[in-house]
Amino acid sequence: MDLFDDADARSPEGAPLAERMRPARLEDVVGQSHLLAEGKLLAGAIRGDRVPSMILWGPPGTGKTTLARVIARETRARFAAFSAVLGGVPELRKLLAEAAEEKRLHGRRTILFVDEIHRFNKAQQDALLPHVERGAVVLVGATTENPSFAVNAALLSRARVFRLESLGPESIVRLLERALADGTRGLGALGLTVAPDALAAIAEGARGDARRALDVLETAARHAVASGAERLDPAVVDEALAQRTLLHDKSGDAHYDVVSAFIKSLRGTDPDAAIYWMMRLLEAGDDPLFVLRRMIIFASEDIGNADPNALQVAVSADAAFRRLGMPEGLFAIAQCCTYLATAPKSNASYVAFTIAKEDIAAHGALPVPLRLRNAPTTLLRREGHGRDYRYPHDEGGFARGEAYLPDALAGRRYYVPKRSGYEQRIAERLARLRAEEAGPSTAPSVARDAEGDATSEASQPPREDSE
């Protein structure tokens, strides 16, 4: 008797509604039409008993375990289940040995279902890999985490990944209606009538999680019956939904999806979306310092010189939060968020250092031109270090025609200011100076000593206005 047979053998009265109502046939599965509709690869493989090794990836309550059970009943293969949380390597090796023996003696495949496969450690994955490679077992893993990060690359390359989506409200309402009508496994024996808007409220509050929807329905129905009511109305549902929790795991995909939406909203100059996603992070329990750290990075990476004040605003918000704590520190975080979202954007500085880094990797350590080298000793000065260096302050603040890159990279451009915010003025100034480079320099040349100080007095030009 395997795990699923054992579950079916238990009395249904003690099992949660979601467990009692779990579909047994492929046609009873609700949702996931992109995988299970007629003509789809996975549906055909199940019906044809050609199930490949696979990873079922999706949020909680989307039917991963249900689909595994359907495969167990519709395939002619032997079925075994293993929990990556509760099982160890010895138990896994025993299952694999039994699978190898079954194939050797009877030519029968074993489908090994691994729940929460993202919790497999390296030893477990290493023990499983050769058996999957040889076809001794067909792996069906279930995970809420991105398999690209959670599963060994070698194991992942031998399995198809099928992504299950959160169920839509219509699909969840169908499940709820099925449970209310079923007098054997469901709640039909209670004789309750249900307001349509009550089911809609459950479907909305479940956020795509069928298990949660059925649990809420059962809680609300039992409460209504205990109170002597004959009708399930939205007020009872609201009470059952009172303890809502956000789908958000600080180390999982849901976390990084919300972070991604937050950063993209900032970059897209949408302060409303940015503050919403930021509050989703904070309300789900993320560390405010993590959010602030992301905003400091954003201020340089995505705003840069388009608004040089953005970095100072982000750093100041971080300092203010550290001093104030919660909840008052949230004011500074919110101010920073809306400032960054509405600021002009430029990634020119980020692009500049990225391209420069690529050139360093491609060309190696190119020599510093002699005129730019330090000359702290007489010997180095005789070697030409610092010779012919032109001091920009002695030439009006700009030594026209001078070059500062290694000779092999002469004329290379890394920083290209965007026409956005303050960087527009930077672009205009650089363009003006570069246009003047072809013209002759009329400023007097002043010799420099080893430390770079003037050896003759020369009147310094007034500082240029800040641009």
Image (cartoon, rainbow, N blue to C red):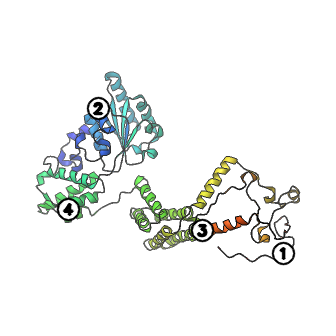
Residue 222, labelled with which disc? Answer: none
Which disc is residue 197 wearing? Answer: 4
Q: Secondary structure at mark 3?
A: helix
Above or below 231: residue 151: above
Q: Position of residue 357 (x, y in %)?
A: 64, 52
Q: Depth-wise, is mark 4 or mark 1 nearer the camera? A: 1
Residue 126, percent from left and from top: 46, 36
User: Could you say which disc has been placed on residue 458 in the image?
Assistant: 1
Q: Residues within 10 Å of mark 1 (few under 14, many from 20)?
A: few
Can you tell which mark lies on residue 48?
2
Q: Earlier in the sequence, mark 2 or mark 1?
A: 2
Quarter of the picture holding the C terminus: bottom right
Determine whether label 2 and label 4 are within 8 Å by CB: no
Provide the residue designation for mark 3: 424
Question: Considering only order in the chain, which callout, 3 or 2, is on the residue closer to the N terminus?
Answer: 2
Q: Residue at x 17, y 49 (%)?
A: 186
Identity, as a three-letter code, of the amino acid under mark 1 = Ala
Tell me the residue at 14%/50% (across/down).
181
**Marks 4 and 3 in Cβ contact (< 8 Å):** no
Of circles 2 and 3, the one toward us is 3
**Disc 2 and disc 3: Cα gap in Å?**
63 Å
Tag 3: Cα neighbours inside 10 Å, few (<14), some, or many (≥20)? some
Instruction: Name the amino acid, label 4.
Output: Asp
